[in-house]
Image (cartoon, rainbow, N blue to C red):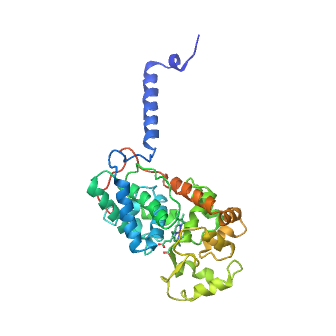
């Protein structure tokens, strides 16, 4: 006698199996982001975001760097659910005051502005989470970096976690193994981590983040580079003084970051450690030689990062404004 799935199961078991299968398929479909998500519901959403982001970066070029960093800090905490944009209330413990973000993460208002432009044309349709993902791509493209097709369909969280923001985001003091494992725990490889760190080709860091390194007299730092940096970052005080990551082309998204690492001119300890005799040296060398490899890997890694635990389907909500839940 034939023992197929069909006749082995009794009727109630069959019904349960079918329900489970439908649920499973449903979850799989919901978890899927697509590039065409707003094609019918808000066809002009992406161009409205782009115009708004371009205006903000035209007014302050560093904002491009700040938005790319915001994309990282938004996806690493609770997934890419825009929890980072929520401000403190009695029921929300804002991530904005967590150590890695406080007085450092920027661009919240720029996202709010872009979202408000989209609300004008399609109220209640486009999430803050997707607005941020599109903004980071537009920021990269605007300053000469790679562009990519943004996957869409994320929804916004109704919660935030300062505790997670304090524990999940990497520190400039992390060693290589720690950095690799932090990214791996989010589904990103060491290669993704190196490519993404390449965005330290633009933007700035505060003195307190690199002081120990420039005053270390270590063998892993170029002496001329250290003394240049000391001019604006004293041994005591001036904690918030800014320095560009890339001395040569601080405003263009290029592969100079990797050339700097090879010359021992990485600004943070967590930058230089990527070319410090460990397993990522060969990736740094490759990107320093091939802008094309860096560019395409950076784009893929940003898409991958944008896929970290999104809220989809009916989970979460579409916020009206990004700084507060509805
Ligand atoms: C690998 C671990 C990483 C560490 C330890 C790290 C650490 C830092 C630190 C300490 C700053 C300076 C913040 C300040 O002084 O206010 C910074 C800035 C920045 N980070 Fe990272 N970062 C890492 C990875 C990334 C990734 C994955 C991205 C994006 C894909 C990114 C993008 C940026 C950008 C663009 C800036 C400049 C921001 C601005 O000028 O406003 N970083 N990072």
Q: Quadrant of the C terminus?
A: bottom left
Residue at 47 percent across and 51 percent down: it is: 309
The quadrant in which residue 129 appears is: bottom left
Q: Is residue 9 above or below residue 49?
A: above
Looking at the picture, tell me which residue is in the foreground, 279 or 123: 123
Looking at the picture, tell me which residue is in the foreground, 323 or 166: 323
Q: Position of residue 149 (x, y in %)?
A: 48, 52
Q: Position of residue 298 (x, y in %)?
A: 56, 59
Looking at the picture, tell me which residue is in the foreground, 120 or 182: 120
Residue at 58 percent across and 66 percent down: it is: 198
Classify residue 10 as left or right of residue 287: left
Which residue occupies the extreme top position in the image?
A: 1
The quadrant in which residue 115 appears is: bottom left
In this rendering, the count of numbered labels is 0
Classify residue 177 as left or right of residue 24: right
Residue at 27 percent across and 55 percent down: it is: 121
Classify residue 65 as left or right of residue 317: right
Q: Position of residue 145 (x, y in %)?
A: 52, 64
Q: Position of residue 72 (x, y in %)?
A: 49, 62
The quadrant in which residue 104 appears is: bottom left
């Amino acid at each position: 006698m034939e023992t197929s799935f069909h006749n082995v199961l009794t009727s109630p078991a069959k019904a349960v199996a079918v329900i489970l299968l439908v649920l499973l398929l449903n979850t799989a479909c919901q978890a899927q982001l697509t590039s065409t998500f707003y094609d019918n519901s808000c066809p002009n959403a992406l161009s409205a975001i782009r115009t708004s982001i371009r205006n903000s970066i035209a007014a302050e070029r560093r904002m491009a760097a700040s938005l790319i960093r915001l994309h990282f800090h938004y996806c690493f905490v609770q997934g890419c659910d825009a929890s980072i944009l929520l401000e403190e209330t009695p029921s929300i413990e804002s991530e904005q005051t967590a150590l890695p973000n406080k007085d450092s993460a920027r661009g919240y208002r720029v996202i709010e502005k872009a979202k408000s432009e989209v609300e004008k044309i399609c109220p209640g349709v486009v999430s803050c989470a997707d607005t941020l993902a599109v903004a980071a791509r537009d920021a990269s493209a605007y300053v000469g970096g790679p562009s990519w097709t943004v996957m869409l369909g994320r929804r916004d969280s109704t919660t935030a976690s300062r505790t997670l923001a304090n524990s999940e985001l990497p520190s400039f003091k992390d060693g290589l193994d720690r950095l690799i494992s932090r990214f791996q725990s989010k589904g990103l490889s060491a290669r993704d981590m190196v490519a993404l760190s390449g965005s330290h080709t633009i933007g700035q860091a505060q003195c307190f983040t690199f002081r120990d390194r420039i005053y270390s007299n270590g063998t892993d730092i170029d002496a001329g580079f250290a003394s240049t940096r000391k001019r604006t970052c004293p041994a005591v005080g001036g904690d918030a003084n800014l320095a560009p990551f890339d001395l040569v082309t601080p405003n263009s998204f290029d592969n100079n970051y990797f050339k700097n690492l090879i010359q021992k001119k990485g600004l943070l300890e967590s930058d230089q450690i990527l070319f410090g005799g460990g397993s990522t040296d060969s990736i740094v060398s490759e990107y320093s030689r091939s802008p094309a490899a860096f560019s395409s890997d950076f784009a893929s890694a940003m898409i991958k990062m944008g896929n970290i635990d999104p809220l989809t389907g009916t989970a979460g909500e579409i916020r009206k404004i990004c700084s507060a839940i509805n």
